[in-house]
Amino acid sequence: MMLGQTTEIILASASKTRADLLRGAGLVIQIVPANVDEDAVKESLRAEGATADRVAEALSDLKALKISHRFPDALVIGADQTLDCNGVWFDKPADMDHLHGHIQALSGNRHSLYAGVSVMKGGQRLWGLVEPAHMTMRKMTPDFITRYCQAVGEDALGSVGGYHLEGLGAQLFTRVEGDYFTVLGLPLLPLLGFLRQNGAIAQ
């Protein structure tokens, strides 16, 4: 149900989770994936010594900027999420073997998620934010990790770290420090606050 929206809003992402969060909050959005070469950008930024939170910010900006040039009258939302575990960065698992390896590596460790979001219009950055969340994963047996990967299947390949906290992924953790929406990949409440302040959605 739309509560009042005055501006066209575009999500420059193919993420179903982010789209569901925005639509669940009552926004009418258009999905236009930016199709940015994320691996190349990450490698370039890593070579420059960038931190994981800086990478999330840069990719969010890049995605929003690319689509903003195509739709100059719309508010374009770009978003990205990075994961750092003891200095090692994790991307979305490429396949089920990678998923198993990711969960095995994260098992028993604390890692940090950085969710970046950027809003642009006409090629100009209006607002942006990077929010952290810190996740403590319990130590799991190899058998449990295998059963978990079989249970979640390829749906988990679309998320950094290979887990969905809103589903079976909740069984992996002993502690979550940070905002729930940030863990899902979008700092939703600050974003809604900006959209209200901007006049894009109703106060």
Image: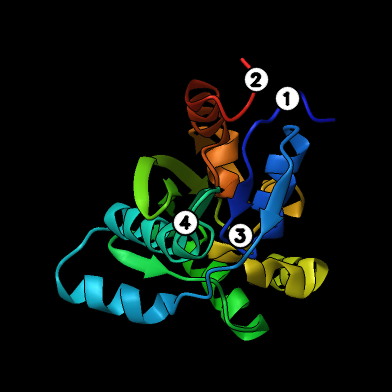
Can you tell which quarter of the image residue 2 is in? top right
Residue toward you, 13 or 107: 13
- Are circles 3 and 1 on residues that touch, CB within 8 Å? no
Q: Secondary structure at mark 1?
A: loop
Residue name at image x 48 percent, y 45 percent: 135
Q: Residues within 10 Å of mark 2 (few under 14, many from 20)?
A: few
Question: Going from the N terminus, do you reach mark 3 or mark 1 first?
Answer: 1
Q: Residue furthest left?
A: 48
- Marks 4 and 1 sit apart, C-alpha to C-alpha, by 29 Å
Quadrant where the image shows the C terminus: top right
Image spot of residue 98 (x, y percent): 57, 81
Please, what is the three-letter code of the amino acid marked with disc 2? Ala
**Disc ID at residue 81:** 4
Q: For mark 2, what is the residue? A: 202
Q: For mark 3, what is the residue? A: 140
Question: Going from the N terminus, do you reach mark 1 or mark 2 first?
Answer: 1
